[in-house]
Amino acid sequence: MKRFAFAIALLAITAGSISAQSLDGTWRSDGYGWVIDIRGDSMRAREVTAISCIPSFSATREASPPAGAVAAFKFVGPPIILQVLRGSSADEMRLHLEGSASDYIIRRASAPPSICDRETPKDLLTTFDVLWQNYAEHYPFFSLKKVDWNAMRATFRPRAATASPTELFDIFTAMIEPLQDAHTSISAPDIARRRGFRRPDPDSIGPNGRPRIAEIITTKYLRTPLRSWVQNRVSFGYLPDSIAYMRITGFAGYTQDGSFRSALAALDAALDTIFADTKGWRGLIIDVRVNGGGADPLGLAIAARLTSAPYLAYNKVARNDPNDATKMTVGQPSMVTPSSRPGWRGPVVELIGRYSVSAAETFTQALMGRRPAIARVGEYTQGVFSDVMGRSLPNGWRIGLPNELFLTEQGTSFDGPGIPPTVPVPTFTKVDLEAGRDPGLERAMALVLGKP
């Protein structure tokens, strides 16, 4: 899911035996700024930039790795299990985050970088510099967002030298906020402050908007009660004229244990029920207009129920040159592969908007290659696709930032403006919410019925 990169949920492994000792040594990631040290039963990771080397997660070897696994490691703290995939050579491995659409490529290094020979200072200016450097080395969108990151440093670094903690937090906020990026954040636990950012919303639905939206759809449009699964993240009911309606409000939080494996099993069971009897359906409307994201492969699992032929969902790359924001890792494609389980191959219309965020957007991108084509009704999506890369600052604060792109077959990225609708309709305006209307849903129903 879209979680901090340090919270790797699972690293999957290809078949083949490698001795535990052969993993011993130092490994560096292609992009992402990871240095991983493996020594016997211990794994230790560090977050490295040109000016810093800060400890990250540690893990211990499990006695019984899964079949075919080189090894399995369990995080110290959270119950996260790590596995290692064989790479293209003995000096390359692939680390897979279960719930992510790609692997981390790590390569053996002769030694850690020299910056790790000393502890990173914790003073104000170093803390400022580490935040600035992490963005400078990993953030791919300065040009797209028209933000001069060097100018930010020149403006704010002198102020940081004598800042109080709250003043420093405000300085960081002033630097990050102009990016208008929903995958950026800063957390300062010692002063109990946290900020997430996104593009401006001049017509915000406000705190009462979500229940009002649900009320309008339920009372005015649905002809059957909604049935819900996976802790109410996926709901299903019928609209007039035998039109099926599926609302997806997230791609995370599907089960109590929080694991991707149990989430996928729960989603598959829900989809089996939803698609068990599609006779008489005129079409299907999928609503992700209020969806905060989660695990990209859960969206692929839904897309797989809607197609008869395989196609590319997206090709994922990550920035891997600290000095050039255009240099990327080799792409890792994700395919939509037809499922043999119950599904629907008839007309589909998707409802999207500015509250379609992250995995809701990769899901939308995963539907774009489906044939027959799926109309998208509403507004541009939020415009954030990457997993969130978490980083520690020397003073104990945390930041989040994106470093990846999800590309179409033609190499297009929708980061920034988001995925456009094919049928533009204003979404959740105050006027419509007050009047109890949903013009987007009405337009989607008309499209299913072939009406202009």
Image (spheres, rainbow, N blue to C red):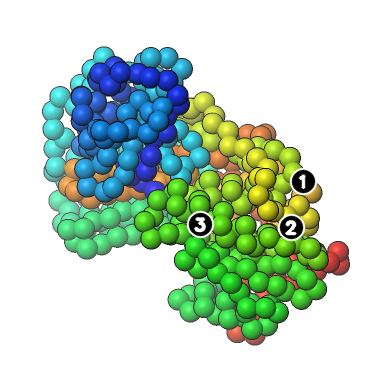
- Element type where label 3 sits in the image: helix
Disc 3 or disc 1, which is closer to the eye?
Answer: 3
Q: Which quadrant: the C terminus?
A: bottom right
Q: Which residue is mark 1?
A: 371
Q: Amino acid at mark 2?
A: Val
Residue 261, placed above or below residue 286: above
Of callouts 3 and 1, the N-terminal one: 3
Structural crowding at the residue carrying mark 1, measured as other residues with C-alpha within 10 Å and reported as few (<14), some (14–19) or many (≥20): some
Q: CA distance from mark 1 to mark 2?
A: 10 Å
Where's residue 395, x and y in %?
A: 17, 47
Give me the C-alpha separation between circle 3 and circle 1.
Answer: 27 Å
**Residue type, numbered disc 3:** Ala
Residue drawn 73% across and 40% down?
Answer: 309
Relative to residue 267, is residue 79 drawn left or right? Answer: left
Residue at left offset 19%, top offset 40%: 126
Mark sitting earlier along the chain (3/2): 3
Q: Residue furthest right?
A: 451
Can residue 157 be seen in the rendering of this structure? no
Residue at the spot of label 2: 348
Q: What distance separates the C-alpha of mark 3 from that of mark 2?
A: 23 Å
Q: Position of residue 146 (x, y in %)?
A: 49, 45
Residue plotted at (22% across, 35% down): 60
